[in-house]
Image: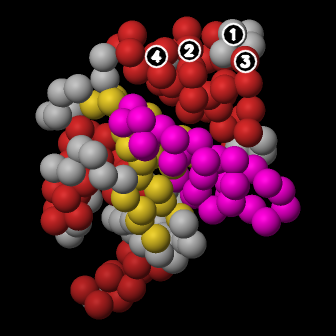
Amino acid sequence: TFVIHVHPNSWQSGADMAKLIQSAIVAQVPLGSLDPYGWTHACRDNMFFGRSWELRKVLESPRLSFAAVGPRKIGKTSFLFQLRKSLAQYPGQTYVYVDCTRIRSLDDFADVVLSGISPKGCYEFRSGRFGSRGLDEALLSVASRQRTRFVIALDEFDAVLSPEGEMGVEVQGILRSEKLHGRCRFVLAGHSA
């Protein structure tokens, strides 16, 4: 709702009225909220378009992993969310979205991935049931129980590859192991993944 004050005794021409309405809207509504593409968040389903070829390639290649690399705010997260919606048509694949900006350690990584896959698997991992092989064994256990392959979308993957520690090397080893064992495939998104 917009509030526009016009003095009852003043007569406004069409052009003057249009300027009055425009200035009232600009004064009351942040311009960013009028943008239909939503630069501050992933776009809604009805606003996602233009990447059907890439989406189809990911959907129709169940044994391949992919990376979406590019500058910020070009639609990588929106692509991952659209992938989740589209995978519903492909049985035997379970989608897990991971926001890597929350990950600070290898245990965080395992915890976030497993909690997205299976609360029971996450509990088993936290309790130390899988010993030194940890995440690898937990994923094997959950995948065999659920009889599915996991599509794990790692958004803002650059956060995991930070040069401050060895976590990136360990995570890459886990990804490689899971991919080779056929339990998971990955869709990475980042600006330098």
- Whether 157 is among the magenta residues is yes
- Whether 136 is among the magenta residues is no
Residue, x 23% and y 64% (percent of image)? 54
Disc 4 target residue? 142
Q: How far is mark 3 from mark 1, CA to CA? A: 6 Å
Determine the residue located farthest toward the right in the rendered image: 164
Disc 1 on helix, strand or loop? loop
Residue, x 79% and y 54% (percent of image)? 166
* The C terminus - image quarter: bottom right
Disc 2 target residue? 121
- Closer to the chain start, of discs 1 and 4, is 1
Tag 3–tag 1 contact (CB < 8 Å):
yes
Q: Amino acid at mark 2?
A: Gly
Among the 4 quarters of the image, the one containing residue 10: bottom left
Q: Amino acid at mark 4?
A: Val
Q: How far is mark 1 from mark 4, CA to CA? A: 13 Å
Tag 2–tag 1 contact (CB < 8 Å):
no
